[in-house]
Image (tube, coloured by chain):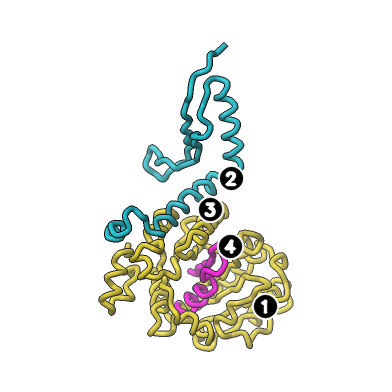
Chain colours: A yellow, B cyan
Amino acid sequence: MSEVIVVTSGKGGVGKTTTSANLGTGLAASGKKVVMIDADIGLRNLDVVMGLENRIVYDLIDVVEGNCRLKQALIKDKRYSTLYLLPAAQTRDKTAVSPEQMQKLCDSLREEFDFIIIDCPAGIEQGFKNAIAGADRAIVITTPEVSAVRDADRIIGLLEAGDLRNPMLILNRIRPEMVKRGDMLALEDVTDILAIEVLGIVPEDESIVVSTNKGEPAVIDNNSKAGQAYRNISRRLMGEDVPIMNFEADNGFFSRIFKLFRT
Amino acid sequence: MDFFNFLFKGRSSSKDVAKDRLKLVLVHDRANCSPQLLEMLKIDIIKVISNYMEIDEEELDIQITQTPQDDGNGSVPVLYANIPIKSMRKVR
């Protein structure tokens, strides 16, 4: 049984592409067959986050327009043999693909892969509609800020209108010390407002910048806290029961802080 | 946060400010009701009520808030209006 999961947020810059790359890699590291689709036509980014930008020959638009076969456009990851990327076109725009074409594309990928991860563009227009068209489930990314949570609320409404019920929340870029002193929304504040199932929380972590610089997802870095968070989320996606935020357990001081917003 | 509230007497944390602002903005987003629409509604309400009584337009408070549903499942938007009356007009 394969699953098509769209990673979305509404607001830009909250971590959709980083999350897509890390979850795709995390799932592949567990032996799953995974393809990541960059649905951000015209603003291609998932390739550079994955460090695969030099290998692109064909893209998503080439596939839907029949310029190449689907298999020709799939780029095999450097690190995991079961991980593939279908890159976005850089020289076209969102109108070059329709929701029906995306749905067809997802359905043909189901035959080959266990997980199909779609990196959705920011916004609520055509690109968003394309990205969610073929999805079974949705992950909503937000950060603990008023603007991001507001957009997440809007996205949850639009997902439900598009028959994608019960989306799952990832609260990204949490800073525990700010939560502790009451200067940042905690997980329960956000879930209070959004009333949505929590898939995971990811701490703000410098290792994300470093890993993006190198084109190596943080999830494969055993010393990265954010990487640990993404490993946990990947396991939850595979149906494992992993408690929220246990990756600070080695540090007495921080683990006490995390208990404040553990659910 | 009691400790901090104690230190800064009543100054609420910025998290609480964020949460309150979010709640308010989402009530409007979800009800699909813009501040402009609310302003138009306010003007109309004043117009109608003024036919019957003299009201304090300065103190008039009208807003959309959330109230829990009777069956306990989530909440529904309600229109809340607090309209202080100065005096009743003589109805002709």
State the residue position of label 3. A157
Dot 4 or dot 3: first in sequence order is: 4
- Is residue A90 magenta-colored? no
**Looking at the image, which is closer to me, A110 or A238?**
A238
Within 10 Å of disc 2 (Cα), the crowding (few <14, some 14-19, many 20+) is: few
Residue at horizontal 37%, vertical 65%? A179
Q: Nearer the viewer, mark 2 or mark 1?
A: 2
Q: Amino acid at mark 1?
A: Asp
**Residue furthest top in the image:** B92
Q: Disc 4 marks which residue?
A: A132
Image-based side of B19 in relation to A5, left or right: left
User: Against B40, is A35 above or below?
Assistant: below
- Percent across and percent down for residue B52 are 54, 19
Rendered image quadrant of residue A226: bottom left
Amino acid marked by disc 3: Gly
- Type of amino acid under label 2: Ser
Residue at numbered disc 1: A59
Q: Distance of mark 1 from mark 3, alpha carbons?
A: 31 Å
Q: Quick one: label 1 or label 4, which is nearer the N terminus?
A: 1
Question: Which picture quadrant has residue A77?
Answer: bottom right
Residue at mark 4 shares a chain with residue at mark 3 = yes
- Quadrant of the frame with the N terminus of chain B: bottom left
* Subunit bearing disc 1: A
What is the spatial separation of the Cα atoms under label 4 and label 2, in whole angstroms? 28 Å
Going by the image, does B44 lie left or right of A137? right
SS of the residue at dot 1?
Answer: loop
On the image, the x and y values in percent for residue B80 come to 47, 36
For image coordinates 49% across by 73% down, the residue present is A19
Q: Which residues are magenta?
A: A1-26
Both on one chain, marks 4 and 2? no
Q: Is residue A1 left or right of residue A257?
A: right
